Image (cartoon, helix red, strand yellow):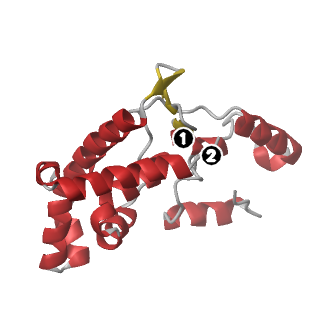
Amino acid sequence: MITFSTTSNKSKHIRKDSCKAKSIIHLVNKETNIENKPNLYINNNTNIINNTIINNFGNERTDYITLDDMIKIFKCSGDNIIPKYIELKHFNKEFPENHNIKYENNKGCLIKNDDRWGLINLEVISNKLFDKNSYELRNYYNNQKSDIEEKIMNIEVLEFIYSRLNYLDLYLNKTLFNNIKNEIKNIIKYNMLF
C-alpha cells in the first residue's frame, strides 16, 4: 500500500492514473482517516485479511485483468490460452477473493456456490471451466479485436489465437481438447492455496 507525505503528492499520483487494481483485502473503511491514525490502519488491515470474502464460483472479479495481461496470455500461451486465463482468474495470489476452487486429494474439488462449499468431480469442474472461460475469452477477443490486432499486428498469430478460442474447433480436435482439459486439471491440482 502506498503512503504519501502530502496530499498534493497523492493528487499527482491519482492524476497519473497508473495505479494497478488491488484485491478487496486492501479495501479500507472510507470513514476512517488513515493519515491521522496509523495504528488503526494496521489493525483494520489485519482484520480485513483474516476475513477475506471469497466470491461464488461463476461470480469472479475480472476487472483487474488488463488488455496487456490478455495480450500476454494470447501471445505466449500457445495451446494453453484457456488454462492460463483460468490460472490468472482463479489462482492469482494478489486476488484471493477469486480462490473459489479447492482441490481435495482423491475426492475431487470443492467449489464455492451459494456461499457454501460443495464437492464436485474434477472432470466435471474442468469441463465447466473449459466451456465458461473459452466463451469469456472469445467474447473478450471479439469485443477488443481492434485493440488486440493493433498490439499484435501478425495475421498468423491472430489466426492461431482465434482458432484456440473457437471451442467448436477444439471439440473436433480431440487430442488438443484433452490436452487443454488435462492442463486445467493440473492447474487446479497444483494451486492448492488453502
Residue designated by label 2: 193
Left or right position of 102 against 62: right
Q: Is residue 86 above or below residue 68?
A: above
Q: Nearer the viewer, residue 144 or 76?
A: 76
Three-letter code, disc 2 = Leu
What secondary structure is found at the residue carrying circle 2?
A: loop
Q: How many numbered discs? A: 2
Residue at 26% across, 46% down: 136
Residue at 11% across, 51% down: 172
| Disc on res. 40 | none
Q: Is residue 148 above or below residue 122?
A: below
* x, y percent for residue 40: 84, 40
Q: Nearer the viewer, residue 103 or 10?
A: 103
Q: Quadrant of residue 144?
A: bottom left
**Camera sees residue 64:** no
Q: Residues within 10 Å of mark 1 (few under 14, many from 20)?
A: many
Q: Are marks 1 and 2 in contact (CB under 8 Å)?
A: yes
Q: Nearer the viewer, residue 151 or 76?
A: 76
Q: Nearer the viewer, mark 1 or mark 2?
A: 2
* x, y percent for residue 158: 17, 71
Three-letter code, disc 1 = His
What secondary structure is found at the residue carrying circle 1?
A: loop
Residue at 12% across, 77% down: 155
